[in-house]
Amino acid sequence: MSISLATTRTQSDPTDHSKATPPVPRRRRWWLVAIGVAMTAAAIVLVQTYVDSNNRTESVLVLARDVPWNQRITDTDLTVANATPDPHVHMIAATQRNDVIGRVAAHSLTAGSLLTAEQLTDHAIPGPGQLLVGLLVKPGQLPARGLRPEDHVQIVSGAQPTVGSTTVGDHPAVQATVVDVGPPNASDGITVDVVVDIELGAALTSMAATGPVLVSLVGPQK
């Protein structure tokens, strides 16, 4: 006789959720969302401010043509351009145009360059405490490269000074700045206008009156 055994497996009904653990509701942290939105907005504002500051331009004065040193600025010397402000460059606003006209170029100014406050002065040469002296010099009495306005020079009497001395006879060497150089005359001599301190004016004019002078170019100070 045979016996049949049957094993019954109890399987849970997948549709029976009566005993399932209820899901825990997620709490939305709105304050974190708010902080994220605020930080994003602040970053956008900072970037926009940076871009705007770099792209901001102002109307400033620019040289329309070359202006020699010691010349007064005229209206035709100026034009207007847009430039980005720079705290290290003292640019002059276009609205100050009338204040600039009539002032004097403190250096030789180049067309197309920005005009800055440091390039202007109120006094033409000779200024207070200065004397303008004209010297007649011939080839061999000045450097072969010639002289230009703003050159710093040393002037001595035509006789060569002794080694180690800055004095020729009763005439000490005089330091001066070239203001202008005239065209050659019939004997190839040129007139060089120099400016000196008024205390040296008498010595220089006396030197020029007693004979030829030698004009040497002085290099930059160390």
Image (cartoon, grey):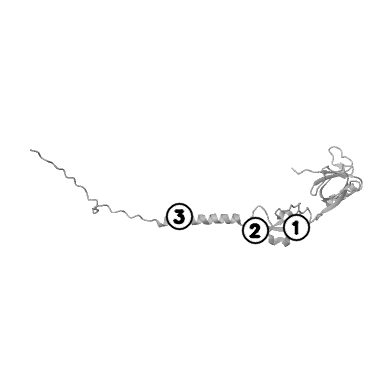
Q: Nearer the viewer, residue 16 or 100?
A: 16
Find residue 58 and name its label. Answer: 2
Image vertical order of residue 215 relative to residue 109, above or below: above
**Real-space CA distance between mark 1 and mark 2, rounded to the nearest whole angstrom:** 20 Å
Q: Nearer the viewer, residue 48 or 12?
A: 12
Residue mark closest to the camera, 2 vs 3? 2
Q: Residue at x 47, y 57 (%)?
A: 38
Q: Quadrant of the C terminus?
A: top right
Q: What type is the residue that disc 1 sits on?
A: Asp
Q: Does residue 117 appear anywhere in the picture? A: yes
Find residue 77 and name its label. Answer: 1
Q: Secondary structure at mark 1?
A: helix
Which numbered disc flags the more N-terminal residue, 2 or 3? 3
**Residue 146: quarter of image:** top right
Q: Secondary structure at mark 2?
A: strand
- Residue 164 in percent (x, y) is at 83, 38
